Each structure stands twice: as structure tokens, then as C-alpha cells.
Image (cartoon, coloured by chain):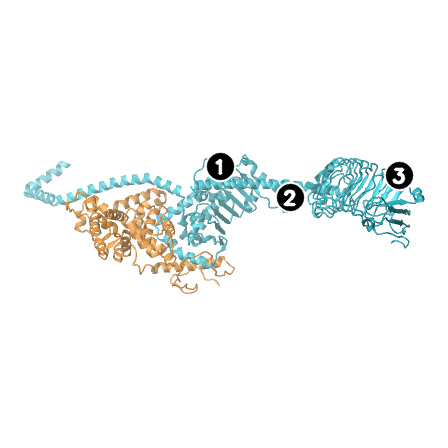
Amino acid sequence: MIPGKYRSVSGRAANNVNCGLHLVIQTSSLPEKSKVEFKLNKETPSFSGRLLQHDLERNYSSRQGDHIHLASSSMPSFPILQRSSEEKILYSDRLTLERQKLTVCPIIDGEEHLRLLNFQHNFITRIQNISNLQRLIFLDLYDNQIEEISGLSTLRSLRVLLLGKNRIKRISNLENLKSLDVLDLHGNQITKIENVSHLCDLRVLNLARNLLSHVDNLSGLDSLTELNLRHNQITFVRDVDNLPCLQRLFLSFNNISTFESVCCLADSSSLSDITFDGNPIAQESWYKHTILQNMMQLRQLDMKRVTEEERRIASVVAKKEEEKKRESHKQSLLKEKKRLTINNVARKWDLQQNRIPNIAPNQDRKVSDSPQDPSQLHGSTVSAFPEETGSLDSGLNNTLQGLSVTDTHLVEVDGDTLSLYGSGALESLDRNWSVQTAGMVTTVSFTFIEFDEIVQVLPKLKIKFPNSLHLKFKETNLVMLQQFNALAQLRRVDQLTIDPQGNPVVNFTLWKYYVLFRLSHFSMQKINGTEVTQNDMIMAERLFGILAHVASSELPQYRLISILGDVRKKQFRYLLETKGKKPGLVNEENSDSKRLVGENTNRATLNYTTRDFYNERLEEIKEKKKFCKMYMEDLVKEATEINMKNEALQKLWPQMFIELVRDAVIEIRNKNSYMKLCLQQITDQK
Amino acid sequence: MLSPERLALPDYEYLAQRHVLTYMEDAVCQLLENKEDISQYGVARFFTEYFNSVCQGTHILFREFSFIQATPHNRASFLRAFWKCFRTVGKNGDLLTMREYHCLLQLLCPDFPLELTQKAARIVLMDDAMDCLMSFSDFLFAFQIQFYYSEFLESVAAIYQDLLAGKNPNTVIVPTSSSGQHRQRPPLGEASLLEGVEASLFSQCLENLCDRHKYSCPPPALVKEVLSNVQRLTFYGFLVALSKHHGINQALGALPDKGDLMHDPAMDEELERLVVRSRLHWTSRQHRAEEPGAFGFQRRDKLEAPESMPSASAPSPYPCRWEPRE
């Protein structure tokens, strides 16, 4: 509030070129209540001891009144300032021209000792006419309309330069102000920090409320203690570690979102006070402990003291984070390995199936990791994972357990699913699986393996993974309905999933019914995800029931026995082969299979022998067939000979009979001599 | 039995004609293979069973293809077995592709060759798109012709090709024939313009063929009948006509007439029993109520099944082994 006797002339005087102006400006003491933040003391030059609040933008006003006269000058636009001599003596080193509606800097005459110059709250657009005040230490141009820093090149003693709330677009023309201690440029339009590297005595730099988007170019500010960058658009900060004395850094209300963008702060050993509030980074869950962890030297964060407790927690959390990262990195590596292996297996499979032209093998991408030692991969690795996960979050509970990853096949146990890729994976069934792992497995998935090979392994599967109820087949070359017969030897299957890819059998309309029919004793619940209804079972029975009937009742007994015997013999043989079999178990298996057979004798004869076995058997039979043929030929020869002889005899017999009779009759013609002959024969015989 | 003509044949020929040796050899081979099992109940019984099954036509079940193909009787038995087992599939009205039929064939004979099925399919489809669907009866009759008379058909194919090419097969195939007929060669242009071959010419060639293959060709009279109805015919047209001819079917004796193809009361009865049993089996295992619903995969062409399911409580001639549950 300006009291009545304060007469002021509008600053538009500068526009009237012609008139000489008589400006009589009197200032009176302003009411007490205006805050006096900055006190001007007699002992001036060293302001270093002064405690400057970081809001230097708060205005101050001097209490002393200054009697100022502004007279016209020779230069038409600039008013000339003159003070009464008493005032000059009283306040020889300071001059306050606040709120004088000045639009230009007046020419100040005869005040060469001036040390403090206050132009606050005016409308000045250019810094001019102060080049002669070479003793100036304190220059305040807060709240004007200055667009460019200029006209300061002679003020070599300047220590405090307050240019807040102007329209300055660039930091420039400060070259000669080597003693500058405080530079306040808040509330301007500065976009870049530049041209400050020579200010080696600068202690406070205020660039709040500007248009800075990043922070760099801070080298050379060797005394900087406080840097205020609030309310900008800063996204990253650099070079702060080049400020050896920086203690306080205010970055509130900017655009910092990651710690990486301010990572240079970690290298600054002098920093003790920092603010990040109002940045996106402050909203992150990891904000506090990341900052604390990386900046152990901090004493205050966001204007609050950092306690020991917080620091401790921060380090613990940071450690956990790192472990988590390591873990997930490991997992992603494993996954990548797995993916590559599966790709490799897939390509091999395609080659095998002659789907793609044969490429040279060295073009194949090989996963370049050594196959893991199998002995390491049994219970030890499997149980190692659960221990690790125990200490981490529950989020890592279902860790993928890649147990064996090599070039050509992949075996993986993931909770309740055992996945096998590639025919080499079938060997893994021979391993010693821990009872717990094996017991948990309810789903077994086969991919890129020939079904014929899987069939041979099914007995092992039955024993090692007794709880496997769901079988999945993809790219396994299922082409015949007959192949499903092989699944009957398992103990129990609840669900079956046959992926159409690589399994042509799925294209047949009746395949599901055949499966249901053949495996009716399993009472399957789902096939390829669809539930099995009673109607389906009935339809299956209806379609194929007669086949079963024919297969059981119309086969001669010996065939029945031989076919069933074959199956049981195979199973028995396998049981005998496995080591460490207890005899009790063997019996159980036998009775089990007997039970199975008893359940549906009519289907049991529908078996599947893999093509190779079949051909092998046919080969074996060839020998027997040859022998049989020869044997039969011999028999036939004999028989035909006998037949011939028989026929010959038939032809000759009548003749022979007549001759026999004739001979006998001739012999008996003479009764007496015949009787004598007979008696003779009898006595001779004795 | 003891007809004079039978006794007139020399031994080997007689045996060969009746394929006695084939069966004997096979019997002995089977005996060797299953020594341990058969020795349990005696060789004599084994032979009885074996030849009984040969008579009944069940000896070919699940045997290798070479055996099934060995004698006409085997082939006929196989056809009959196939019909018996999969009649229900046909009855259901499903139309299947060639591969699916082949699958079914493989259920009975694991190494049945695909070419035969393909040839049979070609007859049905007239050598057209091979992925078309075929009905059970069409396929079965075509398959019968193809399988039973395969050698004959091969010769016929050769003859047909020759005729098409304009050559006179009579002078080629019958090498030192005493007939010495030198027919005029039909002008080349004529044969290529019109489709197929002249029926009468064809018929004559076939007659000669039949004379040579006495036991493995359709009755010549019937073949003549088939050929007498048309002026010209193609190879597949001829085969289709063969397959649809009732007389040939009856002469073969393996399959019933087309009209009766779906009828088999004995098996139907048996089937009903099985279905009932499976239904009881199901309900005893599944205690929850099932919604009757579509299975969710496509059925191509389904006709209404004419028969209705007898309820479980209905009296059946066969004594039920399970008590019907509530």
C-alpha cells in the first residue's frame, strides 16, 4: 500500500520522448507487516555468511526511505535519477527503486559507490545504464520484464544477482561476474543451463520455475552448495557428480521417473539433502529404498530426515530386489534355452517327417550349452528350487523346473505336468524320480515323438508316474485308429488330448468314438477338452460293439490265448527287467492285468503292435513258414505216394485176389496130399 | 463228395485247387508259433478249432495281409468279417473318406496295403477327387470287386489300355493261340475320339481272359451280361457296373444283397446287449447326472437311427447279469 504522499509517475514517461520529466519520487517507510526477508546490513560485502532462504523470490523492502529525484536527461528516453545529498550520505551504498513503475533503468548519476541496487517490481525490459556502478555488489531485478541478461559486463564485484520472475530465455553475458555468489533466475523461461562454468564462487543457483528439460553443463561450479531446480520439466540429471560442494539439490515437481535418469547423484559424495516430491518417481513402490540404497550419504529426503531404520530397510529391500532380478533373469534364460531346444526338436521332427527339404546339419541352430550332468538333475536340483523360492515372494512359487535341456530333446516338470519333447526325452523316464515329484505329476505331454516309440515306453510310464491321468499328444504321428489300442495297457486315463497338429487321425470322424469304445474301461471324462456324455459312450458302443464281440467270441480259443498271452508276456517281461522288483509287486501287476482283462475280455484282443515290431515278427515267422512249407511238402509227397500206391493197389488188387484164390484152390485140390503136407509142416515147425 | 471229376484230377492239382496245402501249412505254422499254449490242450483240438474257424470264416481275423490274400475263401471271409464288424458304422449313416475306411480295414488287418483301398475308392469315385466321402455300401461293394478279383482286374486294366491304344490284345496276350484270329485293327482315330472301348470287343477279350483264369474271375456269363447292355464303356464304368451287379455279388457269396446290407439280426441283438451293459456300466460309475449333449465334433451326414433303444428294464431274451439300478 502506498501512502498518500507518495506520488509516482507512471512508467510510461519513457514513451514521451520530447518532454523533460521531472520525476519526484518519494518513498516513505512502508508498513511494518511487509516481510523483510532480506536485511541489508551495514557490513556488506561478504554475503557468504548470510543465510539465504531458498525462496529468494520473496521480496524485501528497505525500511529506509530514499529521497530520489529522477530528472530528464540528455538522452530523450532515459530518466535521470538524482538523490538529495542527505540521502546520499545516509544511504550511500544502497538505492531502492521498487514499485516505481519504471519501464527502463534510469541513469543513475553520481552514485559510483553504490553497492546495493533494488529494482524490484517494476516493468523494466532491459538492464541498462548501470555500467558505471562498478562497485555494485547486490543487484535485484526481481519481478520485471527483462528478456535478456545484458549490461552487466562491468559489474565485476557483483555477488548477488536476483533476476527472478522475469522473461529471460537464456543464461548469457555473465562472463565477467566471476565473484557471483548467488544467482537467482527463478520464474523465467530458461530452457538450458549454459554459460555458468566460470562461476567458481557461485554457492546458490536458483533455476526454479523455468523450462529446463534436463540438467547438465554443471562443470566449473566448484563452490555450488545449493541448486534449486523445482518446478521444471527435468527428465534426467547429469554432471551433478562434478559439483564437489553440492549439498542441497531440489528437484521437486519435475518429470523424473527412473533412478537411472538421476544416477549421477549416487556418485556425489557431498549431497546430503535432496527432494524428489512431485515427480513420477516418487509414486513408485521402489522409490524410497532405491534412493536410500543408492545414496547412502543422504541425510534428508523430501525435507524429512532419513532414519537408520529406513536405511536398513532400504538395503534389505534392495537386496531382495536384486535377488528377484537375478532369479527372473535365470528364469528367462532357462525359458530361452527351452524355447531354442523346442525349436530344434521341432525342426528335427519336420526333417524326419520329410516336411522340409533336407538342410545341411551345420546350419541347424544348436543350443550351445553343455548338457547338464544327469546325476545333478534328480532330486537335488528339483528340491533346490523349492528352497530358494521359500525365501522369496510367493509370486515365484510355481517356478519352472527345467530338469534337462540339451540339443535334441527336452524334459520338463512343471508342477503337475511332465512335458517331453523329442524322442530322446523318453529315456528320462528311466531316471530315478523322487516319489514326491513323480506323485504330483498328473498330466504327461508328448510332443515331436513318434507314437510308436511312446508305445514302447508306456509300461514304464505306468509304473513311474502312477498318478498320470491326462495324456496329451502333439506331433506324434498318430495315423491309425489301431494305435489307440496301445493305450489300453495303462492303469487309468481320465483325459486325453490329441492335438490336431501332427496327428492326422484326428481328421477322422469316428476317432473319438473309437477311443471311447476301446478305452471304455477307463471311463474317460474328457477328450480334447470336451466332456464325455453317456450318449457318446452309447454311440461308441453302438458303432464298434460288434467288432469287440467278433474279436472275442469268434476267435478260436488258441488265438485268444496267444494274443492275450502275448500282451501279458510283454508286460511280465518288462516287470522282470526292471531291477529291484519285489515279488509282491509282480503279483500285484499280474492280478491287476488279469482284472483288467476280466473287465473287458471282448476288447482285450484289440492290440496294437508297432509297425517295426510287426515287421520283425513277420520276418521271424518267415523261417517257420519255410520250414512248414517244406514239412508239408514232404507230407504231401508221402501222402501222394501212399495215395498212388493205394490207387495202384486198388487197380491191382482184383487181379491179385483172383490169383491168391487160384493158388489156394490149386493147393487144396488134392485133399490127401494137402493134409499130409500140412502135418509135415507142423512137425517141422516143432 | 466222391464225385468222379474230383478223382479225375491228379493229386497236386486237386490240392492246389482247394488250397488245402495253404491251410495245412498255415496250421502247422500257427502250431509252431504257439507251441507252449497249444500243448496245454492238445494238438488234435487245435486242428479241430483251426479248420472249424476256416469253415466259419473267422480264421482271417487280425492276420497278416499275405495270409488274407492267399486264397479266395480267405478273401471272401475277410469281406464278410469287415461287413459284419462295421455294418453299424454304415448303418449310422456316416460318410467316410477313403482313409477312414482304410483305418477300419487296418483294425482287422494291421498291414493292409493302402493301394488296394485307393483302387477301391477309385471305383466308387470314378477316378475323381479322391478325398470325397463315400457311403458304406458303395465302398463295400467296390472293395469286394477290387479285393476278390484283384488279379483279374489288373489284367482287365491291361487289356483296356491296349484297346484304348488301338492294339488288338488278342494277338498280344494269347501268344500261341491255335485260333489264329487276325482281327482287323480298328482305325486308330476312332478309339481316341470316343470315350472308352467298344463293349463287344471288350467282352470278347474278357472271355478269353476268363478262360485262362478259371477260378479267379467273375462268372463269364454275368460279365457278358454286364457288357451287353452298353455300346461303349470306360474302365471304371465297367468296374462300377460289376460292383453293382447283384448276380456277381451272389456268386461271390460273401456279402448279402444291397438291400439287406444293413440287416443282421443276430448281431443286432448282441449289440443291444452290449449297449445295455455299457449303459449300466456308465451309470454305475458316474454318479452325477449327465446332460445329454452334443459331443462337439462334426458328424458329416447322420441319418436317424431307425431302431430305438430298449429300456434297461425291458425283458430281454438273454438273462442280464447285472441288476438294473435305480
Marks 1 and 2 in Cβ contact (< 8 Å):
no
Do dots 1 and 3 share one subunit?
A: yes
Colour cyan belongs to chain:
A
Q: Earlier in the sequence, mark 1 or mark 2?
A: 1
Q: Quadrant of residue A264?
A: top right
Q: Nearer the viewer, mark 2 or mark 3?
A: 3
Q: Tell me the SS state at disc 1.
A: loop
Q: Chain of mark 2?
A: A
Q: How many marks?
A: 3
Q: Chain of mark 3?
A: A
Q: Which residue is mark 1?
A: A364
Identify the colour of chain B in the image. Answer: orange
Residue A516 locus on image (x, y percent): 44, 54
Q: CA distance from mark 2 to mark 3?
A: 77 Å
Q: Earlier in the sequence, mark 2 or mark 3?
A: 3
- Amino acid under label 2? Gly
- Amino acid under label 1? Asp
Position of A359 with respect to A268 (left or right) is: left
Do we see residue B112 in this rendering? no
Q: CA distance from mark 1 to mark 2?
A: 39 Å
- The dot on residue A113 is 3
Position of A54 with respect to A27 (left or right) is: left
Q: Earlier in the sequence, mark 1 or mark 3?
A: 3
- The dot on residue A390 is 2
Residue at the farthest front position: A18
Q: Nearer the viewer, mark 1 or mark 2?
A: 1
- Amino acid under label 3? His
Position of B211 with respect to B285 (left or right) is: left
